[in-house]
Image (tube, rainbow, N blue to C red):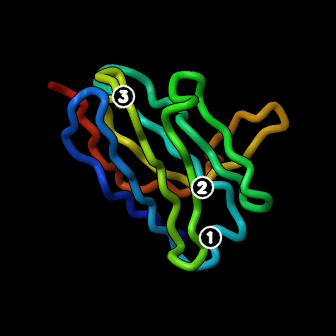
Amino acid sequence: QVQLVESGGGLVQPGGSLRLSCAVSPFVLDSYAIAWFRQAPGKEREGVSCISSNDDSTYYADSVKGRFTISRDYAQDTVYLQMNNLKPEDTGVYYCATAILRSNQTWYVPDFGSWGQGTQVTVAS
């Protein structure tokens, strides 16, 4: 069974930074793309970023390009999301999940995919 565990959320002022971690079961990073999603109160869950399983290609939502960086550490079985210049609209629960990349550089979580439990990010002064 694939397991994903997020950590690193918290309260940060606008303009600040956080690094989220997604610890995954062994060998998962070799087989699946890993994506980050977020959900703000009263809004639908949206994709934030994704990293491929084979060539380390990375993809970002337009709203976070230039501010967020996704990376992967095979030795630690962990995917990171470095978030800089945070804005109040970045507030939400952030989830990582096993994902599938489409040819148009978008991604989705299939029915057989796995999700973490989420970590809260709050950007406020």
Between 111 and 123, the one nearer to me in the picture: 123
Tell which circle, 2 or 3, labels the residue nearer the N-terminal end: 3
Tell which circle, 1 or 3, labels the residue nearer the N-terminal end: 1
Q: Which mark is residue 113?
A: none
C-alpha distance separating marks 1 and 2:
8 Å
Q: Which residue is mark 2?
A: 98
Image point (76%, 35%), residue name: 105
Tell whether 34 sits left or right of 24.
right
Image point (53%, 52%), residue name: 97
Q: Position of residue 103 (x, y in %)?
A: 84, 37
In the picture, the quarter occupied by the C terminus is: top left
Comparing marks 2 and 3, which lies closer to the viewer? 3
Q: Position of residue 62 (x, y in %)?
A: 59, 23
Q: Are marks 2 and 3 in contact (CB under 8 Å)?
A: no
Q: Residue furthest right?
A: 103
Comparing marks 1 and 3, which lies closer to the viewer? 3
Q: Which amino acid type is marked by label 1?
A: Val
**Relative to residue 75, is residue 4 depicted above or below?**
above
Q: Which mark is residue 28?
A: 1
**Relative to residue 28, is residue 89 depicted above or below?**
above
Mark 1 neighbour class, 10 Å CA radius: few under 14, some 14 to 19, many 20 or more: some
Q: Are marks 1 and 3 in contact (CB under 8 Å)?
A: no
**Relative to residue 90, is residue 103 depicted above or below?**
below
C-alpha distance separating marks 2 and 3:
22 Å
* Image quadrant assignment for residue 120: top left
Q: Position of residue 37 (x, y in %)?
A: 48, 39
Image point (22%, 37%), residue name: 12
Could you say whether the residue bearing mark 1 is in a helix, strand or loop? helix
Q: Which residue is mark 3?
A: 90
Q: Are marks 1 and 2 in contact (CB under 8 Å)?
A: yes
Mark 2 neighbour class, 10 Å CA radius: few under 14, some 14 to 19, many 20 or more: many
Image point (50%, 38%), residue name: 68
